[in-house]
Image (spheres, rainbow, N blue to C red):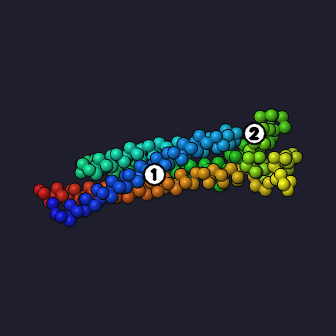
């Protein structure tokens, strides 16, 4: 084996091992953030009241994908240290699969948490339904008051939701100092909050996906170097 090939293999081995350690750290952070969002009582209250459980789907996908990320890290280390060409090939395939699953999870989370995303009209519809039921249903009235007071918002799309339904704008919809109705609807305020809380998760997942690509490329290069090594020895 040439000295140049040996040196290249050693460098890639060390880089891959360091990358795997960093990947484990980031993956555990992502899992922790996803679990925090899933079991945060404040978020849970809004999800239950407004029936927006689709927000949890992206979290579930990301928890599963990052558990796979942690497991794939062990596979990557074993493949790297053993110099087994079959394991390196399997590792490349696994990295590509996890890349796709991670991006899918991030996309689903963004589509159910960001401003003007798929969850936005769902919240608007839920708020309109609560406004309709509130005069005749104590639970709906309490839920409506809880959302509007805690979020500092009014209706699904703004005060016009009450005006269009010929309902008086409640005190929960008004600023306690000025008495003016809140300008923004609860659909805007809640999606802004969900977007803010999930943005770190999304950013870290995209970073992990980028690292999976780098890992796959380096593993492919390492595989070629070991194949070259075999040819030189034969």
Front-lying residue, 25 or 152: 25
- Mark number, residue 187: none
- Mark number, residue 26: 1
Residue 199 position in % (x across, y down): 57, 54
Q: Judge from the rendering whether residue 87 lies leftward or rightward of residue 100; answer left or right.
A: left
Residue 22 position in % (x across, y down): 41, 54
Where 233 falls versus 124 (above or below)? below
Circle 2 Cα neighbour tier, 10 Å, few/some/many (<14 / 14–19 / ≥20): many
Find disc 2 in the rendering and name its residue: 143
Circle 1 Cα neighbour tier, 10 Å, few/some/many (<14 / 14–19 / ≥20): many
Earlier residue among tags 2 and 1: 1
Q: Which of marks 2 and 1 is in front?
A: 1
Please give the name of the residue rendered at 63% of the width and 50% of the height, measured from the top-left corner: 194
Front-lying residue, 156 or 1: 1
Front-lying residue, 137 or 196: 196
> Do the residues bearing badges 2 and 1 touch, measured as CB atoms within 8 Å?
no
Residue 95 position in % (x across, y down): 38, 51
In the displayed image of the protein, which residue is found farthest to the left? Answer: 234
Please give the name of the residue rendered at 83% of the width and 34% of the height, measured from the top-left corner: 136
Quadrant in which the N terminus is drawn: bottom left
In the displayed image of the protein, which residue is found farthest to the front? Answer: 177
């Amino acid at each position: 084996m040439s000295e140049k090939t040996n040196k290249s293999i050693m460098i890639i081995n060390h880089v891959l091992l360091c990358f795997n350690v960093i990947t484990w750290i980031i993956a555990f952070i992502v899992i922790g953030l996803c679990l925090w969002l899933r079991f945060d009582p404040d978020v849970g209250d809004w999800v239950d009241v407004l029936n927006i459980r689709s927000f949890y789907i992206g979290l579930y996908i990301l928890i599963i994908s990052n558990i796979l990320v942690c497991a794939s890290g062990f596979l990557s280390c074993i493949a790297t240290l053993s110099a087994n060409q079959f394991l390196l090939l399997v590792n490349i395939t696994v990295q590509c699969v996890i890349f796709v699953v991670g991006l899918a999870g991030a996309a689903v989370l963004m589509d159910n948490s960001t401003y003007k995303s798929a969850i936005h009209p769902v919240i608007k519809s839920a708020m309109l339904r609560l406004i309709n039921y509130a005069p005749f249903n104590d639970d709906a009235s309490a839920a409506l008051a809880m959302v509007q007071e805690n979020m500092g918002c009014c209706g699904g799309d703004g005060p016009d939701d009450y005006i269009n339904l010929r309902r008086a704008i409640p005190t929960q919809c008004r600023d306690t100092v000025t008495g003016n109705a809140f300008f923004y609807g609860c659909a805007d305020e809640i999606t802004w909050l969900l977007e803010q809380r999930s943005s770190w998760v999304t950013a870290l997942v995209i970073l992990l996906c980028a690292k999976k690509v780098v890992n796959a490329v380096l593993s492919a290069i390492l595989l070629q170097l070991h194949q070259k090594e075999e040819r030189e020895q034969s």
